[in-house]
Image (cartoon, rainbow, N blue to C red):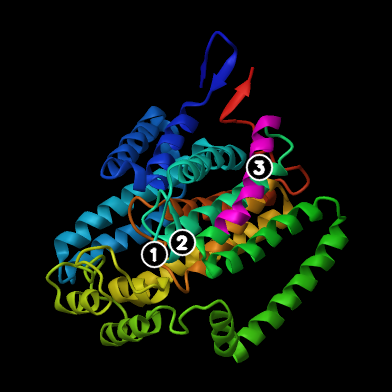
Amino acid sequence: MTTFPDRITVNLASVLTFGAFAALVLNAMFGSLAALTFMFCGMLLIVSNPARSVDSLRRWWFVLLLPAYCILTALWSQFPTNSVRYGVQLMFTAMVAVVITGRLSTATLMRLMFIVYAIGVVASVAFGRTGAGGTWLGVFGSKNAFAAHIAVFVLIAAALTADRDSPWFLRLCALGGVVISGPLLILAQSAGATLMVLPCLAVIVLTLVTTRLSQNQKLFLLVMLAIAAAALALVVLVLGDTLLAEVLEGSGKDPTLTGRTDLWATGLGYIAERPLQGLGYRSFWVIGFAPAEELWAMFDVPAGAGFNFHNTYISNAVEIGLVGLAMQIVLIYGGALLMAAYTFARPSPANALLLALQLLMILRSFIEVEVFFEFSIRSIMGIATFIYALAGLLVLRRQPSTPAPHLSHRGLFRHA
């Protein structure tokens, strides 16, 4: 923590995390410098307080089992060099996520994420461009990337607007972000992003409502939500395909999700061949590998352009098998359940945001691949959410009669 003569306190961990996040979120603007900037800021974050870094890594060592397993797949990978290289990079990314949870509060993380994502929004409005069919790409490579950015931004802005502990000018900017996010999603012409962001916004609103309810009222609301969720799940299981087809047809989209169903069928075939161990981490989409080359050609995608199976479970199971996929599911769904429990016990805008982002990750996991790979802010947030929630619940368990410590005491900037 550094204090300047004007009595503004700067948190070094916040600054370094901001730099790391900015590099990842705005990688379309930074280009090849994004990974280098992230590694530089991440390494400085780790070594700037080695005692706390080691303590965090020792305490949450089990979340590093996933990248360790990815490295291990080099033993049977058809491209072992890739598995080791990218596995090590994923390990570093996971370590940075663990260290962040030990250095930053959830409220601080929310504020710096808003600033980072707001930069992307402002840059997109000022210097953005349109793609085929008039879709708005912003400063990103595709409309899907731009829509995903706006979806996350609106959730952060909504949560920050409701955070009474944040500076008024930051909350005012967040309110403006909520207002402009709707038109920007429309410009992106992404029906999926729009539909997915609505239940996530509802999570934030419901969390804020529960702060005014008694414990019994919150319990009643939780039961009603569980019943509604079960009913919705039943409807999706029974009528999911029909409803999806109607939604896609009504929005003018391809019923096959632009060929994703063909990709999924191909991926399932490879999973059936090697179900437990997979082909090896990052060993399918490799230039020169005939099946990958065939799919790139089929979908008119340049070889090595970062294509995937557009489904987290299928894509990752192809490479790391059902064993590795099980580890990922624990982090994804375990993080959501743990954060839901912690948010229920200690409702706050920051906790609500983490829960909403985890829900968004789950919803997008069925049509996109956002986790777990190197230099990915969504991967970092997935790991961080799991740890924040588990740490909070452990505090509540140890001190059942004492209010949990307020998590916003270390701000991105704070007046002394």
Residue 171 sits inside the magenta stretch: yes
Which residue is at a point 41% across and 70% down the rendered structure image? 312
Which image quadrant is residue 402 in? top right
Query: Which amino acid type corresponds to the residue marked 1 in the rendered image?
Result: Ala
Query: Which amino acid type corresponds to the residue marked 2 in the rendered image?
Result: Thr
Q: CA distance from mark 3 to mark 1?
A: 28 Å
Q: CA distance from mark 3 to mark 2?
A: 22 Å
Kindly identify which residue carries mark 3.
Answer: 176
Return the x and y of residue 300 as percentages of the image width and height: 25, 74
- Magenta stretch, residue numbers: 167-185
Which residue is at a point 34% across and 81% down the rendered structure image? 263
Which image quadrant is residue 194 in? bottom right
Q: Secondary structure at mark 2?
A: loop
- Of marks 3 and 2, which one's residue comes earlier in the chain? 2
Dots 1 and 2: beta carbons under 8 Å? yes
The image shows residue 41, relative to residue 198, as above or below, that is above
Query: Which amino acid type corresponds to the residue marked 3 in the rendered image?
Result: Gly
Left or right of 373? Residue 243 is: right
Q: Secondary structure at mark 1?
A: helix
Which residue is at a point 64% across and 17% down the rendered structure image? 416
Kindly identify which residue carries mark 1.
Answer: 132
Left or right of 45? Residue 318 is: left
Which image quadrant is residue 197 in? bottom right
Return the x and y of residue 71 as percentages of the image width and height: 25, 60
**Which of the pair 379/122 is nearer the observer?**
122
Category of crowding for the residue at label 1, using alpha-carbon neighbours closer than 10 angstroms: few (below 14), some (14–19), many (at least 20): few
Kindly identify which residue carries mark 2.
Answer: 135
The image shows residue 133, relative to residue 396, as above or below, that is below
**Which of the pair 161/175 is nearer the observer?**
175
